[in-house]
Image (cartoon, coloured by chain):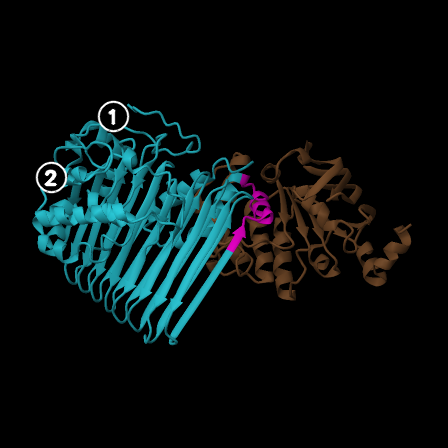
Chain colours: A cyan, B brown
Amino acid sequence: MSSEPALNDFAVDYKYGFSMPETGVIKAEKGLSEQVVRQISAAKGEPKWMLEYRLRAYETFRKLPMPHWGAYLSDIDFDDIYYYVKPTEEQTTSWEDLPDEIRTTYDRLGIPEAEKKFLAGVGAQYDSEVVYHNIRKDLEQKGVLFSDPESAVREHPEIVKKYFGTVIPYNDNKFAALNTAVWSGGSFIYVPPGVKVDIPLQAYFRVNTKSFGQFERTLIIVDEGAFVHYIEGCTAPTFTKDSLHSAVVEIVALPGARVRYSTVQNWSNNMYNLVTKRAFAYENATMEWVDGNIGSKVTMKYPAVFLMGEGAHGEVLSIAFANKGQEQDTGAKILHFASNTSSVVTAKSISRSGGVSSYRGLIKAGPGLKNIRSKVECDALLLDETAKTNTYPVMDIQTDDVSMEHEAKVSKISEDQLLYLMSRGISEEEAGSMIVNGFIDPLVKQLPMEYAIELNRLIELEMEGSVG
Amino acid sequence: MKSLIIEGLKAEIEGKPILHGVDLEIKTGEFHALMGPNGHGKSTLANILMGHPKYTVTGGSVKLDGVNILELDVPDRAKAGLFLAFQYPVEIPGVTVGKFLKRATEIQAAARKQPFTVSQFLKTVREDMTFLEMDQGFINRYLNEGFSGGEKKRMEILQLLTLKPNFALFDETDSGLDIDALKVVSKGINRLKGPEFGGLIITHYQRILNYVNPDKVHILYKGKIVTSGGTELVHQLEEKGYDWVKDQFGA
């Protein structure tokens, strides 16, 4: 069934590393050019304004230099990537309608089963396009919109035009520009005033094609007093060549709204995961990012909250696991633009076998603001002598009326902790897993139970073979 | 009846010899006390029996029911029926008492080929907690994290009662306890006493021995057991102090 052998020697326990024969109906030629940008836009039958926006972004991408900070990115060869692979003719609301290869993939990932059990809606993206999309009828009746962004461009241009590119402009950074030029798939959500979506909506991103770049675009608008919890998961085959995932996620939490965005990123270890995520939180709105990074070769991702109105609250919970050959450069950005705003950043990272995890954070508060509260806590756990961790916290506070806490801690699993658990009959490997899962437990508790279990299980897999 | 037989046990830490040939035999149904001045190897002995990696065994054997446990790794020693109540139980953040105890009990049940059910486990733990006058809320707390000294020691005894080992070593379990906590801890130890259980308590004080009534008392001095006897040894020590040991066995 699998067409590509999994050759990556350090991804031994990555059970999602399989790939399926390519079924694509459109595959743009390799490499990036204005021609490819136009081809993507044409394939989607886009209005002119979106094409023009893409072309502007493409020009900007070409001009902007690679980031000179963070992880080493110079090995990315933009000419050796497929930017657009359309896997099926049409999107469907029924798993049965999908081609066998694609349906089997999602079955193996357990998505249809999860949808039945505990999700209010699911979008499933395969390479460049969302191939399956469904939302519970009762939510649809309440006016909740949940679709791929292409459908939103067609059906709700007034909302898209109003917000698209306003939270993260195309010239924000090189990879935001790249995404804006070639974006394809992702999610669009609109929750009307006062509507609480009581169970989560999920998007699942799957890459199948070798040397592929996935550039999904997500726009979430949560109207006054409304609530939504959005979850995304991601996996990819383990290829010998690197892949690129560069998403842009824009969120607008209007006054009194609450948005929770949870990610459990489990990309294969050949993936460059370079994502820009940002939310605007207006008066009394709350934005929470729960960001779990287990997979990928390199991740650079710093979910941001701009606190735009009084009473707004921003929160980032970040968990990273850097195993052999991995670099997790993650963190958070909170910008206080209004008085009486508060923020909490809790970041926990685990590194082993030469893996590097870095916390990179920015807390900013402008001049003249009153009653600003912020708390940053970052803990790093090193599992062996070769594991590395860095902390780069930046505080740019231009007001005096501020309460600011920052704690950073680096710890190791102690011999005494292992001995204690082992003296009760628990194997060394399991004891290590228990301690690591315990380390992140305060964060994992924030996830819905099914995801908490999944995350714990992923950590256990990462811990396998940890006993030398 | 099972036995724990220590013969000619020699050990060192970072090249420095600490035990110079310890001989000691404990049978199930017996409860022994090990006394002696600080720094002469009492805690070392307990930790070596459990398998602490910082010590190196340089000679001798330790047989539990005929098996030389020095050849087993730490978890297998536990599965063979050995338990150590630590002097300083470590904190394990994020791992709840309930989760930890359940897993440890499950492993013990499998090792003994006994059935394990979560409902029975919970029932037993809750009863044991009540017996040890512990708040039921402890089951959801992170293991030893933020526990007072007394709470940590009770947690060791709760594990003892839950796991029901054949042999338990108590490393200064009485140190730092007030009289009420001491009574509770002693009550826990006494509850496990019986034909299936043997214990060795390491202590400096007569106090706890008044509650747990050892059958035999040994004195460890300069890495060797220099004398053994009944509770009269304890009274002698209380009266004369360790200078007496030094005078008698110091040469």
Task: Provide the residue designation for mark 1.
Answer: A21
Q: Position of residue A337 (x, y in %)?
A: 29, 68
Q: Give the residue displayed 71% in from the left and 40% down from the top.
A: B56
Label tally: 2
Q: Residue furthest front?
A: A63
Give SS at disc 1: loop
User: Alpha-carbon neighbours of circle 1 within 10 Å: few (<14), some, or many (≥20)?
Assistant: few
Q: Quadrant of the C terminus of chain A?
A: top right
Asked if residue A421 lies in the magenta stretch, the reply is yes
Q: Earlier in the sequence, mark 2 or mark 1?
A: 1
Q: In which quarter of the view is residue B118 placed? A: top left
Task: Provide the residue designation for mark 2.
Answer: A42
Q: Are discs 2 and 1 located on one and the same chain?
A: yes
Tell me the mark number nearer the camera, choosing from 2 and 1: 2
The chain letter for the residue carrying disc 2 is A
Magenta residue span? A410-428
Q: Give the residue displayed 54% in from the left and 41% down from the top.
A: A426
Amino acid at the residue labelled 1: Pro
Decide if residue A391 is on the left or right side of residue A338.
Answer: right
Amino acid at the residue labelled 2: Ala
Q: In which quarter of the view is residue B54 placed? A: top right
Q: Is residue A372 above or below residue A39?
A: below
- Is residue A120 visible in the rendered image? The answer is no
Q: CA distance from mark 2 to mark 1?
A: 26 Å
Decide if residue B38 is on the left or right side of residue A33.
Answer: right
Q: Position of residue B45 (x, y in %)?
A: 72, 46
